[in-house]
Amino acid sequence: MGEGRIICGNLRNLRMGNIMEKTALIISTLDTKGEETYYLRDKIESLGIKPLLMDISMRGEGPTRADITPEKVAKAGGGSIEEIRASRERSRITNITIAGASRIAGEYFVEGKLDGVIGIGGSTGSLMATEVMRSLPFGIPKLMISSTAALPGLATRYIGTGDIVLFHSVVEISGLSDLLKNVVDRAAYALAGMVQGSITSSRAEKGKAIAMTMLGPCEKCASAVRTALEERGYQVIGFSAAGIGDRAMEEMLSQGLFQGVIDLAPGGVGEHLFGFMRDAGPNRMESAGKAGIAQVISTCSVNHMTPAKSKYKPEYHERRKYDLDRFRTWVRLSPDELREVAKAFKEKLNRAEGPVKVLIPQRGWSSVDYPGNATYDPEEDRVFVEELQDGLNPGIEVLEIDANMEDPEFARGVVETVVKIL
């Protein structure tokens, strides 16, 4: 009987030892959220996870019980804690702190010493902690306990392009009431489940994972392409090309999560040039090229733009338009704007270090582009094609298909091209 207890005890210790290899980074400002953060740390430790506490305070001057002190964070960000505490340039010292915290978190991850991240805070703490989280790769458990998660606009800023779980505390994070303990307990258990559970790797089998942009006006094409490629053994991961989704795709391409990209809807390039609603940032359509990843590019939405109606220039009221719904209107690009977008495409694609093919549907670039629609103008679309071809690297082939983007013939052309290029 005693021997049985010893064996069971040893097995339990062994299991606990394996669990303790999991480490959770806790990010907080201990000068304002100390009591609450220490409670979170103790709860996480009680669940068999090693806590690693990072203090990103910028004002507190007392001693800290953090594993990673504000002094270490400031130094990693290229500054000093004395400089941060003395400065009134809030934006500057915040950037130093975020840079330092992100660098330290990244080093722990690379060294295999970080399995999950959890933050706790109000608006400032949430903004800083989630920016650190977004610096880490997709797939690492990330959870933010925030008292300001429901404020208009802040949730979008906190999450951005990150795979972050946002936990609205509802009550203020100020004092250890039973209500707040309830919130923190549930958040700790949630992170523990993600860290200790058996989770499918975010990295698919080599040669099988393909990223694909998609929008409602080319959804039929995207669906047909995905189905056909999945039948051939590929995994196709879709991203909504509405600005945030394609920004996220660019980040994940740079992390090496995909072996190819089907960019059906790269309109975010032009939206960035003109500052419109689907702005996908300055690096749109660049990550795959830098990584040498195969690209198949097409033109859904490239000949239309989505300016916010509150920011219409007088001339936009006279442009040809198509109402996608009562919230979104596509406005036709002018020939000069099409040339400008084509030049941006050409500049980005000419820098690509991997194979690139461009597919142009000659009978309309989306379901919006069809005969009888006010914005349908294949002759003007030629302006884009001709500008793109003029000076494009010889190794980049532009293939024109006699079909609308939503026709089965075009989807088959995409699939055939992808299979050849990969």
Image (spheres, rainbow, N blue to C red):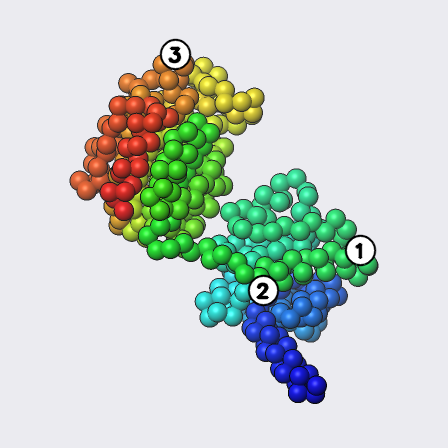
In the image, 112 versus 422, the foreground residue is: 422
In the image, 147 versus 166, the foreground residue is: 166
Calculate the distance from the C-alpha at mark 3 to the C-alpha at mark 2. Answer: 57 Å
Could you tell me if residue 279 is visible in this image?
no
Identity of the residue furthest to the left in this view = 394
Residue drawn at (39%, 17%), measured in percent from left and top? Answer: 375
**Discs 1, 3 touching: Cβ within 8 Å:** no
Which quadrant of the structure image shows residue 285? Answer: top left
Residue drawn at (76%, 57%), measured in percent from left and top? Answer: 182
Q: Is residue 241 above or below residue 309?
A: below
Identity of the residue furthest to the bottom in this view = 2
Calculate the distance from the C-alpha at mark 1 to the C-alpha at mark 2. Answer: 26 Å
Total numbered labels placed on residues in the image = 3
Q: Secondary structure at mark 1?
A: helix
Read off the residue under disc 1.
179
Residue type indicated by callout 3: Gly
Q: Secondary structure at mark 2?
A: helix
Residue type indicated by callout 1: Leu
The mark found on residue 372 in the picture is 3
The mark found on residue 196 in the picture is 2
Residue drawn at (43%, 44%), measured in percent from left and top? Answer: 237
Disc on the earlier residue, 3 or 2: 2
Residue 33, image x, y percentages: 72, 62
In the image, 380 versus 354, the foreground residue is: 354
Disc on the earlier residue, 1 or 2: 1
Calculate the distance from the C-alpha at mark 1 to the C-alpha at mark 3. Answer: 60 Å
Relative to 101, 303 lies left or right: left
Which quadrant of the structure image shows residue 263? Answer: top left
Residue type indicated by callout 2: Gln
Residue drawn at (27%, 42%), measured in percent from left and top? Answer: 419
